[in-house]
Image (cartoon, rainbow, N blue to C red):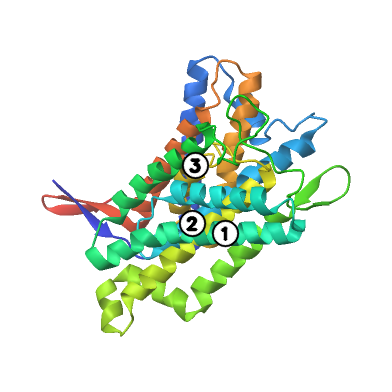
């Protein structure tokens, strides 16, 4: 008996969706088995988790506002990473680029916020974060095209460089360090929320929608159109399929790589500016691991811009909901969401394999198709 893998004919969209849905349901079943093993009712836990504790909660609007504060930087970072990944440039440096963007945005807020109008300060924060984060990513791209360095390794190492810069700023009490409060004996980051803040709009009742949510949707739409309707977007797809083919077609591959990586890192910087401008303060945990989680979101969504919004929404529900559920079910740690997220990723990748290929089992005297 011989077993071999055969490339499957292209499946219709509804069948692909069924495969992915089955993978997610299987992950939930596995999670349910774990919950049962520790004496927790899976249905009750999942109900609490997927509603994020809003059922019967008099301040449910606050829960949703906090949910959107996590959703915005995650989805924007995921969209940004997908640009580089489509070109097969493995930008693992989302964390570092986010941190550098956050530091730059906080720099502008602390230095210029007290003397400039709110709108001008916010605009300068976004521009500074985008430029600095873009240059941080561009450094790796330049080394890649000039010397053929490994971008995965370099972006990974630069994450820690940025992290330790942030820690240094947060722990060094000195006259020059304006990032810290002057009136605190302990090193504490200074708040700038009194003079710099992204505006929010009331949608009736007490719920308010931050403008960053609207801007993120606009950016997502622009990226979608950029990839689908422009020459530059087509070039990214060609380089991703085959750099050799792109060169043969007369495309300037190195220029495309530099441009796309810079744009990818710029958008991560914009996500950082949104996060810092909304929080009103810098912190050593400012990223909330969006650089790492964004990689998972981008791959689960198959680098599709629209799907990234849906997957990011699900991941944020898992994280926020697990915190709410942990408050009710003391036996389950809030990190249960990370395990569930890992199971979903593994099973979705398995489903993707069976979407692309089929297993053929050959026997003596005949053949069975798996």
Residue 128 image label: 1
Residue appearing at x 49%, y 40% in the figure = 166
Residue holding disc 2: 133
Residue 17 image label: none
Relative to 292, say whether 221 is above or below: below
Residue appearing at x 26%, y 67% in the figure = 146
Secondary structure of the residue carrying tag 2 is helix
Q: Nearer the viewer, residue 7 or 60?
A: 60
Please indicate, yes or no, whether residue 39 appears anywhere in the rendered image: yes
Please indicate, yes or no, whether residue 308 appears anywhere in the rendered image: no
Where residue 192 appears, x then y in whole percent?
70, 43
* Badge nearest the viewer, 1 or 3: 1
- The numbered mark, 1 or 3, whose residue comes first in the sequence reads 3
Secondary structure of the residue carrying tag 3 is helix
| Left or right of 164 in this view: 89 | left
Residue reaching furthest right?
205
Where residue 69 appears, x then y in whole percent?
66, 44
Q: Nearer the viewer, residue 172 or 315?
A: 172
Instruction: Tell whether label 3 touches label 1 (CB within 8 Å).
Output: no
Q: How far apart are marks 1 and 2 (CA)?
A: 8 Å
For the residue carrying disc 3, how many other residues have a C-alpha within 10 Å: few (<14), some (14-19), or many (20+)?
many
Relative to 346, say whether 200 is above or below: below
- The numbered mark, 1 or 2, whose residue comes first in the sequence reads 1
Residue appearing at x 28%, y 71% in the figure = 242
Residue holding disc 3: 24
């Amino acid at each position: 008996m011989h077993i071999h893998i055969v490339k499957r004919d292209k499946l219709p969209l509804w069948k692909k969706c069924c495969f992915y849905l089955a993978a997610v349901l299987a992950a939930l079943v596995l999670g349910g088995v774990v919950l049962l093993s520790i004496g927790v009712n899976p249905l009750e836990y999942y109900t609490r988790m997927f509603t994020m504790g809003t059922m019967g909660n008099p301040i449910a609007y606050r829960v949703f506002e906090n949910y959107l504060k996590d959703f915005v930087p995650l989805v924007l970072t995921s969209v940004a990473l997908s640009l580089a990944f489509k070109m097969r440039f493995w930008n693992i440096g989302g964390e570092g680029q986010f941190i550098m963007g956050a530091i730059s945005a906080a720099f502008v807020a602390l230095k210029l916020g007290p003397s400039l109008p709110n709108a001008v300060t916010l605009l300068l924060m976004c521009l500074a974060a985008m430029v600095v984060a873009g240059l941080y990513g561009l450094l790796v791209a330049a080394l890649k095209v000039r010397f053929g360095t490994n971008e995965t390794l370099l972006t990974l190492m630069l994450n820690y460089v940025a992290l330790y810069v942030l820690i240094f700023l947060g722990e060094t009490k000195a006259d020059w360090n304006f990032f810290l409060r002057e009136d605190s004996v302990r090193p504490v980051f200074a708040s700038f929320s009194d003079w710099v803040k992204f505006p929010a709009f009331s949608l009736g009742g007490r719920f308010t929608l931050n403008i960053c949510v609207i801007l993120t949707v606009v950016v997502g739409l622009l990226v979608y159109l950029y990839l689908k309707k422009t020459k530059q977007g087509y070039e990214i797809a060609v380089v991703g399929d085959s750099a050799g083919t792109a060169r043969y077609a007369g495309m300037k591959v190195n220029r495309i790589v530099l441009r796309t990586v810079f744009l990818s890192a710029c958008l991560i910087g914009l996500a950082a500016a949104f996060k810092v401008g909304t929080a009103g303060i810098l912190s050593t945990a400012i990223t909330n691991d969006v650089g790492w989680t964004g990689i998972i979101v981008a791959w689960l969504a198959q680098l599709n811009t629209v799907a990234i919004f849906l997957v990011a929404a699900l991941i944020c529900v898992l994280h926020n909901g697990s915190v709410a559920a942990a408050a009710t079910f003391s036996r389950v740690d809030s990190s249960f969401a990370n395990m569930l997220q890992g199971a979903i990723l593994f099973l979705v990748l398995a489903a993707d394999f069976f979407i692309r290929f089929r297993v053929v089992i050959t026997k003596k005297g005949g053949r069975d198709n798996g």
